[in-house]
Image (cartoon, helix red, strand yellow):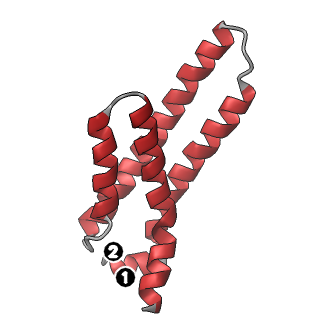
Amino acid sequence: MKLFVRSAIQLTPVVISFLLMGAHFLRSGHLFFVVLSFVFIGLLLVKRPLVARLVQVVLVLATVEWIYTAFVFVSVRMENGLPWVRLVIILGGVALFTLASAGVFFLKTQKERYSL
């Protein structure tokens, strides 16, 4: 039971990252990607090495999406003469959080769980 609780706590940043991506895609109207975000949360229940690596790759791609979104939003705000620094800090923080959540699979508990 202890191992399950530790594993669940360690996977929390991964789940939050996918929820944030789902919200991002929902805001932009991409329902397919919203559903896909929830599918990846469900995939965390499958204890296979391929799942862990696939989730890591998707989290890195999600980081790229956050950085791209930051550039697009900042350029629009700069063109309109609006403040943009806070936007960079927030989206940069979300991008770093998403990238860091991919590192969860390097923890001992997750290596054991996913046979890495």
Residue located beneath label 2 in the image? 116
Q: Are marks 2 and 1 in contact (CB under 8 Å)?
A: no
The amino acid at mark 2 is Leu
The residue lying at 41 percent from left, 28 percent from top is 28
Name the residue that disc number 1 marks: 112
Residue most extreme to the bottom = 1
What is the secondary structure assignment of the residue under circle 2? loop
Q: Nearer the viewer, residue 12 or 113?
A: 12
Dividing the picture into quadrants, the one containing residue 41 is bottom left
Residue, x 25% and y 64% (percent of image)? 50
Image: 58 above or below 52: above
- Most foreground residue, 38 or 43: 38
Query: Alpha carbon of mark 2 to alpha carbon of mark 1: how far?
Result: 7 Å
**Front-most of residues 79 and 104:** 79
Circle 1: element type: helix
**Mark 1 belongs to which amino acid?**
Glu
| Image quadrant where one finds the C terminus | bottom left
Position of 5 relative to 30 (above/below) = below
Q: Position of residue 71 (x, y in %)?
A: 56, 24
**Quarter of the figure with the N terminus:** bottom left
Q: Is 92 placed above or below 50 here?
A: above
| Residue 14: % across, % down | 46, 60
Horizontal and vertical percent for residue 105? 43, 68
Question: Quadrant of the rendered structure where residue 74 is?
Answer: top right
